[in-house]
Amino acid sequence: MRCASLRHLALRLVLLLPLGAGAEDDALPLPTFTLPPGFTLEVVSDDLPNARQLALGPEGTLFAGTRRDGRVWAVKDGVRYTLAEGLNLPSGVAVHNGDLYVAAVSHLYRLPNVEKQLETPPALEVITDALPTDKHHGWKHIEFSAAGDLFIPVGAPCNICDPEPPYASLLRMDPRTGAFEIYARGIRNTVGFDFEPGTGALWFSDNGRDMLGDEIPPEELNRITAPGAHFGYPYVHGGVLLDPEFGDGHRLDAYEAPAFRLPAHSAPLGLAFYTGSAFPERYQGALFLAEHGSWNRSSKIGYQVSVAFLEDGRITRLEPFLTGFLRGEETLGRPVDVLVEPEGTLLVSDDHRGAVYRIRYTGPQGATPTLARSTP
């Protein structure tokens, strides 16, 4: 449920900069973004077609994977570089020890020492080509743990089916060899995760199945503290619904319940815990998430960046943070990933416009937004 107070309307910021080649349709109207009081938004780049997952190098280079575009981007000092092209949905990017890792459908690649070679990028090194080749939910989001393990998902190759592992799983991989183990199962399609500060717990989004109507099943935010968990797919959805095709003989309580449920079809993707200090105190340790938005619902939902507030590893409140990607039922943008920069600003990628935005806090401390969503 969303509510608003006219007296405390969030800051509205109109982007006046023209969008470039990154936009799907240059004739699209510019979004009028809404942020909580004291926050401002700027365009980092509007020329990154299909920008998906974001990563930062130690020397300040911004990297962006893509899906259908097939290229991997870098931006440094306002200059765009193409690091690779012609890849198969290279959505996932992560930096580790100065090397850029790129996850495509069946491949994991490495570009060594990439920030020193942006103008003439190194050749792609193949770490593994042994992942499944299915394009359906085959695009990936990747993250390194503090211990240096690479986490990489393999989605279900369908809307609803009962595939054998490694499908519908989250893998923990050795980035040197490509050898992996199944870390968690029953995950239909996760395209975003992050590690909780302090505890190291892994939080991830999971997009629920389609074709059951507008309101079911819920989307999921899940929390893992140890390997071996099963989150229910395809038998149980959101911890509350037995699947009409695969649920017979299964119990709701036999699988891990979500840490939080989001409305059906809102499509939560990228997650990022706020580890900076530039935002007001209430955002310290909060979890930002990009809701990519629905494609098969009678009225659109999602299309925003939200922020979740936690206490003792539990989400107690979820609020819209960045809105304006929709104008009525017209799509003006679709957020994909969120990333906290070292100076405490927040980056947001938009694959619909081929843009990356930066959000800063410039207002007085203690400003409190008034738009909120109740905990389901």
Image (cartoon, helix red, strand yellow):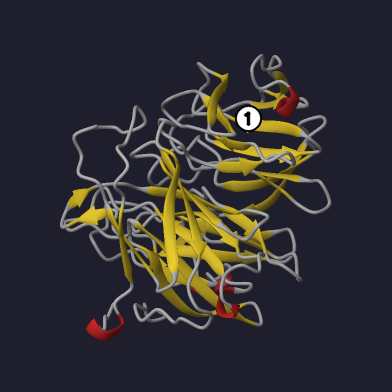
What residue is pinned by disc 1? 131
- Residue under the point 55% across and 46% down: 168
Locate the C terminus by quadrant: bottom left
Tell me the quarter of the image containing the N terminus: bottom left
Q: Say which of 331 and 283 sits in front.
A: 283
Foreground pick, 43 / 51: 43
What residue is shown at x 56% (from left), y 23% (from top)?
81
- What percent of the width, then of the height, locates residue 186? 55, 54
In this rendering, would 94 be left or right of 335?
right
Q: Is residue 240 above or below residue 290?
A: below
Residue type, mark 1 in image: Leu
Residue 169 pos. (x, y %): 60, 47
Which quadrant would residue 92 be assigned to in this image?
A: top right
Tell me residue 334's x, y (percent). Answer: 35, 48
Is residue 147 shown to the viewer in this render? yes
Which of these two is toward me, 247 or 303?
A: 303
The image quadrant that residue 241 belongs to is bottom left
Horizontally, is 266 left or right of 260 in the view?
left
In this rendering, does residue 237 appear at all? Answer: no
Residue 142: x %, y % from top left: 63, 43
Mark 1, secondary structure of its residue: loop
- When the figure is inspected, residue 80 is found, relative to residue 346, above or below; the finding is above
Q: Does 335 appear above or below 33?
A: above
State the residue in front, 351 or 11: 11
- Number of callouts in the render? 1
Dot 1, how many residues are within 10 Å of its Cα: few (below 14), some (14-19), or many (20+)? some
Q: Is residue 171 left or right of residue 297?
A: right
